[in-house]
Image (cartoon, rainbow, N blue to C red):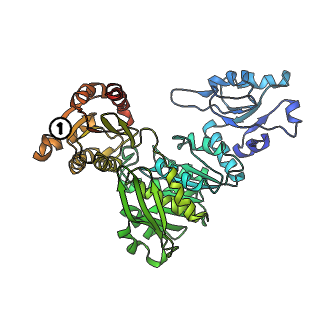
């Protein structure tokens, strides 16, 4: 059972604690959890009011008190603080009050402090693409052998990660947590909260270039996960990524580095006995799924058969990260390998939907150049020779790389054998122009539209029985709308 003590929260936040005489005299007083949302606040919990550009959680302090919060946190200069403190003089049931300089910092300091009392090993997953898939794969591969938890949904930022840590059961053995970013410096800050025992970097891509800068800047941001790792920690990186490999060769002297990689890169990477995990005999079947044999130079005589009931080639690296994590934790490797069978794709992340006369690859959750290429290759495999219709939305936050990335998307579309292409969003104007410039792709272009709503009639008009439809783009463009309408029309064909 989780117990947050008044003295702990005061110590971790360096705040000033005010209590009624009754509460101050109660040596067994505690709070069961910490919340930032009065809509879900339960009696006895701590309420931390966060502030943003367009909201201020302090506006809901009275609501938190009505819901019998055990403690309310308040910034020193907040309006209404004096009234809340006055309650302590005449209401023995008034909530404790913790006064801090900054509630955002206090919330993160609570998570950082609680991390020090957790016995769990934390596996921190970051990277430009594949974080959620990798996090969920690792969890599935270890959960049969240890008491494991993982980040819920996309709880991976400056609010989500503290929430993940603060909600972790004290008896948990392993927490698999995502570390994401929108701005420079965030990964380092999150890593210092999570203090990962195992760090994972899935790869370096163009995502968030608009806010971070060049590819080297993105590399520095992602690799800053090491800022929160102890000297005896292990960092597992994608050995197929040349930027990560170069970084390892220059900076790997403080913590141990392990690789996951494609088989053809193993000979170069395992120099001086550096641990490497790789896949042999990779086989993808659109009906049966993905299978391969996992190998590592840490156990040269062992073979770990992996089967994943989904034919996505991008899942190879996710499963290799799972194997490497299981090895770090000292788990039974054969049982960990068997855990990959339980993996299920999440909604809108390369979700394969089979309608009576139409198959759909729904990958509308988000988009980056690397994930777009992977989705198109998966579509080519799943289609099995059928006509492929692609609805491609713009990829956001690519900054200086945006035009080039969208131009190169035309080559990915061509190479994947896509038959008909419908583009959505301003960024894909560059894709449109590149498709029209090449004779080989000119006839595949159906149309360009500013929004999903505008594109829908062309999508519905283009589809035929037996087609394979792929929907891929940044969430900004709401391509789920097209998916929903297509399912309404084709669900009963």
- Where residue 22 appears, as percent x and y from the top left, is 88, 30
- Closer to the camera, 273 or 141? 141
118 vs 87, left or right, is left
Question: Which residue corresponds to mark 1?
Answer: 445
Q: Please give left or right for residue 101 compared with residue 493 in the image.
A: right
Residue 219 visible, this angle: no
In the image, what residue occupies the spot 32% across and 38% down? 359
Q: Is residue 371 above or below residue 83?
A: below
Please name the residue shown 70% across and 55% down the image: 119
Task: Answer above or below: position of 309 versus 58.
Answer: below
Q: Quadrant of the C terminus?
A: top left
Residue positioned 61% across, 43% down in the render: 164
Instruction: Return the x and y of residue 136 as percentages of the image width and height.
Output: 51, 49
For residue 26, which quarter of the picture?
top right
What is the tally of numbered marks visible in this picture? 1
Coordinates of residue 397 in the picture (x, y in percent): 36, 41
- Rate crowding at label 1 as few (under 14), some (14 to 19) or many (20 or more) other CA atoms within 10 Å: some
Q: Nearer the viewer, residue 382 or 237?
A: 382
Instruction: Point out residue 383 in the picture as x, y percentages from the top left corner.
Output: 28, 45
Which is more toward the observer, 162 or 85?
A: 162
Please identify the quadrant where the N terminus is shown: top right
Mark 1 lies on a secondary structure that is strand
Residue 265 lies in quadrant: bottom left
Q: In which image quadrant can residue 391 be found?
A: top left
Asked whether residue 442 is in view, the answer is yes
**Side of 350 where 97 appears, left or right:** right
């Amino acid at each position: 059972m989780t117990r947050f003590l008044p003295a702990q929260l005061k110590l971790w936040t360096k705040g000033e604690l005010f209590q009624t005489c009754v509460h101050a005299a109660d040596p067994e007083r505690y709070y069961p959890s910490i919340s930032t949302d009065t809509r879900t606040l339960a009696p006895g919990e701590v309420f931390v009011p966060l502030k943003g550009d367009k909201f201020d959680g302090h506006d809901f302090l009275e609501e938190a008190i009505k819901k019998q919060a055990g403690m309310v946190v308040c910034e020193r200069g907040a309006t209404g603080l004096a009234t809340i403190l006055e309650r302590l003089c005449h209401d023995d049931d008034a909530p404790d009050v913790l006064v801090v300089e900054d509630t955002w910092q206090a919330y993160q300091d609570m998570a950082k402090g609680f991390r020090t009392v957790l016995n769990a090993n934390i596996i921190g997953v970051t990277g430009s693409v594949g974080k959620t898939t990798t996090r969920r794969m690792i969890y599935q591969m270890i959960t049969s052998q240890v008491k494991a938890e993982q980040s819920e949904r996309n709880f991976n930022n400056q609010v989500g990660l503290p929430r993940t840590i603060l909600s972790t059961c004290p008896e948990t053995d392993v927490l698999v947590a995502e570390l994401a970013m929108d701005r420079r410096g965030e990964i380092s800050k999150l890593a210092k909260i999570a203090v990962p025992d195992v760090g994972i970097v899935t790869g370096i891509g163009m995502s968030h270039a608009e806010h971070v800068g060049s590819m080297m800047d993105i590399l520095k941001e992602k690799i800053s996960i090491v800022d929160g790792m102890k000297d005896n920690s292990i960092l597992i990186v994608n050995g197929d990524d040349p930027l990560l490999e170069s970084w390892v060769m220059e900076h790997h002297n403080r913590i141990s580095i392990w690789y996951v990689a494609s088989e053809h890169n193993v000979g170069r990477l395992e120099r001086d006995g550096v641990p490497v995990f790789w896949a042999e005999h990779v086989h993808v079947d659109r009906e049966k799924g993905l299978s391969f044999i996992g190998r590592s130079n840490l156990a040269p005589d062992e073979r770990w058969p992996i089967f994943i009931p989904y034919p996505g080639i991008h899942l190879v690296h996710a499963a290799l990260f799972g194997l490497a994590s299981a090895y770090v934790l000292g788990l039974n490797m054969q049982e960990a390998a068997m855990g990959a069978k339980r993996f299920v794709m999440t909604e809108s992340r390369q979700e394969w939907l089979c309608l009576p006369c139409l198959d759909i690859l729904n990958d509308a959750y988000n988009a980056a150049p690397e994930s777009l290429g992977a989705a198109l290759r998966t579509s080519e495999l799943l289609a099995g020779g059928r006509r492929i219709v692609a609805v491609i939305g713009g990829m956001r936050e690519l900054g200086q790389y945006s035009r080039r990335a969208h131009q190169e998307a035309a080559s990915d579309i061509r190479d994947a054998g896509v038959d008909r292409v419908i583009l959505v969003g301003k960024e894909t104007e560059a894709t449109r122009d590149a498709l029209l410039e090449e004779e080989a792709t000119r006839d595949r272009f159906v149309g360009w539209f500013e929004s999903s709503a505008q594109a829908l009639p062309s999508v519905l008009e283009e589809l035929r029985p037996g087609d394979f439809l792929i929907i891929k783009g940044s969430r900004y463009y709401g391509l789920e709308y097209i998916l929903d309408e297509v399912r309404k029309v084709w669900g009963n064909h």
